[in-house]
Image: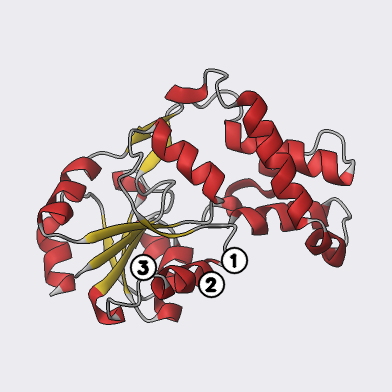
């Protein structure tokens, strides 16, 4: 392997606080409320657990459609949503949310292992880049991942992954692996023709081994310490 893409939430980090909404959640809710004049909208209450693996654009689209917004109207207002998200971030980025995220168990040692092998590291995430950069800084990963693609590059996860692959076209697909924690990660890797490893909820992910293995693709692990399993899969 020469290139490793990583999802963010449930793969590298997890939110350490359970009370209150994260800055990302508040910024998206604010943007939807402002642009579409829907008071009190909360995408987590609307979508529930199905948000795991969704891109930010898909989250906003599905939540707004359930609130009666026409899909065409949603697409016409995407730029306005991004501007409103940025406005909220600019006003609230230093509001005390810096300790919201912690790294998953053993992820530091796994990343050190990849770095020692001179593997290029990148992000492939449904988070828009503004959210991604903030979360990485929050968790102490600022500047660690130097390539990839984000939720404002495309709407669907496999399309985001395809953008990231194109940005690193000096590396053949057979030497790329995506590391994630959801069936959506595995499905995107299959669609893009690269290998994939998913960490289960036993190691800090968001989905069970049963849910992940139901995709019939990639390798499912219970810990980032499972180096022998990963090495065998990638060999």
Q: CA distance from mark 3 to mark 1?
A: 26 Å
N-terminal of the two: label 1 or label 2? 1
User: Residue 46, how many percent across, how many down?
Assistant: 73, 46
N-terminal of the two: label 3 or label 2? 2
Q: Is residue 17 above or below residue 186?
A: above
User: Residue 86, how many percent across, how many down?
Assistant: 66, 39
Residue density around tag 3, few if under 14, some if 14–19, many if 20 or more, within 10 Å: some
Numbered mark located on residue 154 in the image: 1
User: Residue 108, how many percent across, how many down?
Assistant: 21, 41
Camera-nearest residue between 140 and 182: 140
Residue density around tag 2, few if under 14, some if 14–19, many if 20 or more, within 10 Å: some
Q: Secondary structure beneath disc 1? A: loop
Q: CA distance from mark 1 to mark 2?
A: 6 Å
- What residue is disc 2 on? 159
Drawn side of residue 177 relative to residue 130, left or right: left
Q: Do residues under tags 1 and 2 come within 8 Å of each other at their CB atoms?
A: yes
Task: Point out the frontmost of discs 3 and 2.
Answer: 2
Identify which residue is drawn at 58% across, 48% down.
49
Identify which residue is drawn at 23% across, 49% down.
223
- What residue is disc 3 on? 213
Q: Secondary structure beneath disc 2? A: helix
The C terminus lies in which quarter of the figure?
A: bottom left
């Amino acid at each position: 392997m020469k290139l490793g893409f990583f999802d963010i939430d449930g793969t590298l980090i997890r939110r350490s606080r359970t009370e209150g909404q994260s800055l990302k959640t508040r910024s998206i809710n604010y943007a939807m409320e402002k642009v579409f004049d829907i008071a009190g909208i909360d995408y987590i209450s609307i979508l529930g657990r199905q948000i795991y693996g969704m891109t930010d654009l898909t989250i906003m689209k599905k939540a707004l459609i359930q609130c009666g917004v026409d899909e065409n109207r949603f697409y016409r207002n995407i730029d306005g949503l991004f501007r409103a998200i940025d406005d909220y971030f600019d006003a609230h980025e230093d509001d005390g949310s810096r300790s919201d995220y912690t790294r998953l168990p053993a992820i530091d040692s796994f990343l050190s292992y990849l770095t020692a092998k001179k593997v290029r590291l990148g992000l492939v995430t449904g988070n828009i880049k503004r959210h991604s950069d903030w979360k990485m800084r929050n968790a102490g990963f600022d500047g660690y991942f130097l390539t990839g693609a984000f939720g404002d590059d495309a709407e669907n996860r496999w399309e985001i992954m395809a953008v990231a692959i194109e940005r690193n076209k000096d590396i053949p697909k057979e030497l790329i692996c995506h590391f994630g924690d959801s069936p959506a990660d595995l499905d995107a890797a299959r669609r893009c023709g690269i290998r994939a490893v998913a960490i289960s909820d036993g190691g800090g992910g968001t989905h069970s081994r049963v849910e992940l293995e139901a995709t019939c693709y990639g390798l499912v692990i219970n810990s980032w310490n499972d180096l022998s399993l990963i090495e065998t899969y990638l060999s």
